Image: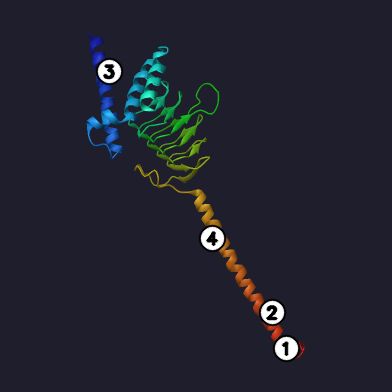
Amino acid sequence: MNIKINFQGRKMAFLTRIKEDIQTIFDNDPAAKTLLEVVLCYPGLHALLLHRLSHKLYKKEIPLLPRLISNISRIITGVEIHPGAQIGKQFFIDHGMGVVIGETTIIGDNVLVYQGVTLGGTGKETGKRHPTLKNDIVVGSGAKILGNITIGNNVRVGAGSVVIEDVPDDSTVVGIPGRVVVHKGQKNHNLQHNVIPDPIRDALSELTQEIKDLKQIIKKDLGTNTEENSNSEENKHNNGSGI
């Protein structure tokens, strides 16, 4: 009797998690129209469901089968998640193609990643060698987060960024290598991951403005010198020294 109750409890928990995964898609993707569409047409959901199965088998130390399920998932969805990766609630892979999540990756709750994201290692070291992502994080398309580093709560990682160092809470990181450009700013959980500062553009704008200022100073100095020389010549002429 106890076994039946436990089985039913686990079954309900599994179904609840699936319902939560589906609701996360509706919450984050305005293109999601119907339940049938989400269930049949979202590879990120398929990859996540297959990962939850392979992860359970992986924790039971069952050989080969978890990796086989992971490989089948990669072939079907284009998303590669190692069975050892730990993934929390409300995780959403949008579009999905090319996403890679390594074995010792730890992902918290309410994390959104776009296509082409890599959560990988940096070498052949053993043990914890992949990143830890906390809660409320958006990782833009093509971003790479590499090594045993920690991405704090409420962080946005810009598209195409390469992050190789820890990122504090409430930050925005962009660039190669990734640089924190906003820290302790106003919290924003919207999907406006493209609205991020551009430090290179800002630096070039500052440099351009400095050049303009220098040109103005030079023109002013040249104008002053020309006027002084003209006055000097006029004075010489009036005094007869120029004749």
At label 3, which amino acid type do we have?
Arg
Q: Could you give the CA–CA distance between mark 1 and mark 4, rounded to whole angstroms? A: 42 Å
Q: Could you give the CA–CA distance between mark 2 and mark 1, rounded to whole angstroms? A: 12 Å
Q: Could you give the CA–CA distance between mark 4 and mark 2, rounded to whole angstroms? A: 30 Å
Residue 213: x and y, percent?
57, 64
Q: Quadrant of the C terminus?
A: bottom right
At label 1, which amino acid type do we have?
His
Mark 2 sits on what residue? 229
Marks 4 and 3 close (CB-CB < 8 Å): no
Outermost residue, top side:
1
Mark 1 or 4, nearer chain start: 4
Residue 212, by quadrant, is bottom right
Mark 4 or 2, nearer chain start: 4
Mark 1 sits on what residue? 237
Mark 3 or mark 2, which is nearer to you?
A: 2
Residue in view at x 35 percent, y 42 percent: 191
Mark 3 sits on what residue? 10
In the foreground, 135 or 21:
21
Mark 4 sits on what residue? 209
Q: Could you give the CA–CA distance between mark 4 and mark 3, rounded to whole angstroms? A: 64 Å
Helix or strand or loop: what does disc 4 sit on? helix
Mark 4 or 3, nearer chain start: 3
Helix or strand or loop: what does disc 3 sit on? helix
Marks 1 and 3 close (CB-CB < 8 Å): no
Mark 1 or 3, nearer chain start: 3
Residue in view at x 42 percent, y 30 percent: 99
In the foreground, 225 or 165:
225
The crowd level at tag 1 (other Cα within 10 Å; few <14, some 14-19, many 20+) is few
